[in-house]
Image: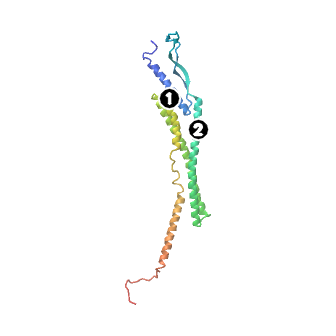
Amino acid sequence: MGGGGGDGGAGARQEEEERRKAALRARIDNLYGIPTTGVGRFQEFEPDPVPTGYQESGEPIFGVRQVWRERPFGDVAQAEEAKRAMEEEGTKLSGATRDYYADELGKNYQEAERGTRFKLARQGLLGGSEDVFQQGDVQQDRDLGATRVDEAVRRAISNLTSQREQERLNAVNLVNAGAGDSAVSAAQAGLSNSFENVSSAQKAQLFTDLFKNSADVQTGSNLTAQQMAMLNRSRGISSFFPNTGKTTSGSITPS
């Protein structure tokens, strides 16, 4: 009775469907640098050696027949090449991220260092112990900023890895739901989009709380200057109305 197991061939069809999905999942894995391989039976069509009829000239008419053949799926070499390409993208992202934040940190540090130096010069403290102390604070903030740059680079790479894996899982889920080559196309697009999304993501403000001491001291210096100006102004006004130390009774007497 054909060996169908009494299920009308449903079991065999299910088995072939699982092989088809496994091959598609392997293609997706290979795109993401995962060397998944396997062997499956695949449906093919070939000329049927038994003629289906004859032409008037006597020439035989051949049709086609469906056959199943085992062949390997997955490409380890492609997976290795994809892995190298993704590592290069990671290196590119790492360098671009570090360059951006290092440039921002450098600008903040130079501004704080210059502002502190000018302030100390105005106060006559340049070159003294206070100079060493305050510039040391500025350098400590710079070193803390450098640590944050390193963390931002690691975070960018982690985001890229996470997005890639999510895109791979999305494509695999499409295969599991019955999709065919469209799932592989989605995986290819997701791989490209992951890098673009992370590369163009809005940069964080890493240094807003750094170099505060130099900014606060500068503000304090400006405030002191304003207060001195007001004091000098009040002294100038009092010269027109000298205080003799005498008091009046509030009454006016004729001379």
Camera-nearest residue between 47 and 131? 47
Which residue does the image show at 50% across and 65% down from the upper left? Answer: 223
Camera-nearest residue between 137 and 32? 32
Q: Residues within 10 Å of mark 1 (few under 14, many from 20)?
A: few
Which residue does the image show at 57% across and 34% down from the upper left? Answer: 82
Numbered mark located on residue 87 in the image: 2
Query: At numbered mark 2, what does the secondary structure look like: helix, strand or loop?
Result: helix
Amino acid carrying label 1: it is: Asp
Q: Which x, y percent locates residue 122? A: 57, 66
Q: Which x, y percent locates residue 168? A: 50, 34
Amino acid carrying label 2: it is: Glu
Location of the N terminus by quadrant is top left
The numbered mark, 1 or 2, whose residue comes first in the sequence reads: 2
Does residue 91 appear left or right of residue 201 in this picture?
right
Classify 249 as above or below 213. below
Numbered mark located on residue 38 in the image: none
Does residue 7 appear left or right of residue 162 in this picture?
left
View extreme (left): residue:
251
Does residue 78 appear left or right of residue 53 in this picture?
right
Q: Quadrant of residue 87?
A: top right
Which residue carries the number 1 mark? 181
Classify 111 as above or below 47. below
Query: At numbered mark 1, what does the secondary structure look like: helix, strand or loop?
Result: helix
Q: Is residue 144 visible?
A: no
View extreme (right): residue:
127
Q: Which x, y percent locates residue 133? A: 59, 60
Q: Which x, y percent locates residue 253? A: 38, 88
Q: CA distance from mark 1 to mark 2?
A: 26 Å
Which residue does the image show at 51% across and 28% down from the upper left? Answer: 24
